[in-house]
């Protein structure tokens, strides 16, 4: 039993659900609580506004199929068969579902004409196809003309040796699978993708900063093969990368030794 000395007095701000709310407590609810909530909302809006633009990359709806010559190195790409709109074909980078690349789906298909099915992820002029569904990647089942059967992509063309500044990211998230798909906040995710053999890319920027992107280079090792786990210490950082640039269809491939990557 509480003593009479500890019992609430008239005028105390002591809330009892079935009694009238004390005046002081009512004033607290009316004035202080809305202010606290408003300040919290304002901080949230300010924090959101301070974040960089995650870009326009996104998944595009609708299952698509493409046909062309598959090249497995450094990462799977398809050089599509020429058509009226693209007389030289197009070069499409492939990736797998989730945090895995398409490397595991292309065994024994390198250099062959294949069908690939999936959905596109695109950011600006750059895109990848996430393969899956009823087609995924398989030797073509289409009836081809003699000209289509004889199609061969243009040979790689050496452009020159350059030192480029930018950020190393995984191609899938950067192009729209994640938002944001770049920056330090995305470092762990980018490394997880590279562990899964998703193609790394170097995104170069102008002197005006990350919002003024200029180019995306598919990264390869010095021998033109895959390079991913060697880059884990450099993802999502400002870097300078020195290497040889090759043009392969619509893609520019940056062949680099891990020793040619320097943080800025």
Image (cartoon, grey):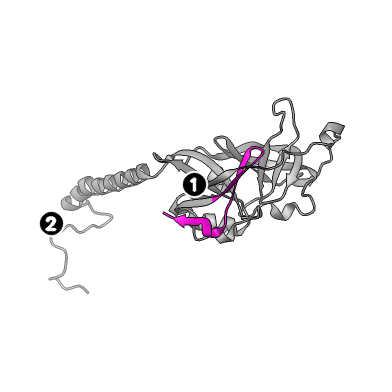
- Is residue 89 shown above or below 199? above
**Residue, disc 2:** 11
Magenta-highlighted residues: 243-264
Residue to which mark 1 is pinned: 164
- Asked if the stretch drawn in magenta spans residue 235, the answer is no
Whether the magenta-drawn stretch holds residue 263 is answered as: yes
Question: Disc 1 and disc 2: Cα gap in Å?
Answer: 73 Å
Figure check: 124 above or below 34? above
The C terminus sits in image quarter: bottom left
Toward which corner of the image does residue 2 lie, by quadrant?
bottom left
* Relative depth, front residue between 75 and 183: 75
**Where is residue 194 drawn, in percent x and y?**
58, 56
Whether residue 125 is visible = yes
| Residue at x 66%, y 54% (from the top left corner) | 225
Give the residue drawn at x 45%, y 42%.
205
* 1 vs 2, front mark: 1
Q: Nearer the viewer, residue 229 or 20?
A: 229
The numbered mark at residue 181 is: none
Q: Is residue 119 left or right of residue 24?
A: right
For mark 1, give the secondary structure.
strand
Q: Which residue is at a point 12% across and 56% down the rendered structure image?
A: 11
Q: Check disc 2 and report its element: helix, strand or loop.
A: loop
Q: Main secondary structure of the magenta part?
A: strand
Residue 261: x and y, percent?
A: 50, 56
Q: Which quarter of the rendering shows the N terminus?
A: bottom left
- Of residues 206 and 116, the one nearer the viewer is 206
């Amino acid at each position: 039993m509480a003593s009479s000395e500890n019992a609430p007095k008239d005028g105390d701000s002591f809330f009892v659900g079935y009694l009238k709310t004390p005046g002081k407590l009512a004033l607290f609810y009316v004035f202080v609580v809305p202010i606290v909530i408003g300040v919290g909302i304002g901080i949230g809006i300010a924090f959101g506004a301070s974040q960089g633009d995650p870009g326009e990359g996104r998944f595009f709806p609708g299952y698509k199929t493409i046909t062309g010559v598959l090249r497995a190195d450094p990462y799977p790409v398809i050089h599509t068969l020429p058509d009226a709109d693209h007389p030289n074909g197009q070069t499409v980078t492939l990736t797998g579902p989730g945090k895995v690349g398409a490397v595991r789906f292309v065994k024994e298909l390198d250099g062959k004409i294949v069908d690939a099915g999936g959905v596109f992820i695109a950011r600006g002029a750059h895109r990848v196809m996430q393969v899956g569904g009823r087609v995924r990647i398989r030797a073509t089942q289409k009836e081809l003309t003699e000209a289509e059967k004889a199609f061969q992509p243009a040979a790689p063309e050496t452009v020159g040796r350059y030192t480029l500044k930018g950020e190393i990211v995984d191609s899938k998230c950067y192009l729209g699978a994640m938002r944001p798909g770049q920056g330090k906040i995305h470092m762990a995710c980018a490394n997880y993708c590279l562990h899964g053999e998703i193609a790394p890319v170097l995104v170069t920027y102008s002197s005006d900063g990350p919002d003024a992107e200029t180019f995306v280079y598919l990264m390869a090792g010095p021998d033109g093969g895959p390079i991913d786990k060697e880059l884990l210490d450099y993802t999502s950082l400002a870097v300078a990368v020195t290497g040889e640039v090759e043009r392969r269809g619509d893609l520019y491939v940056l062949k680099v030794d891990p020793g040619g990557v320097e943080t800025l």
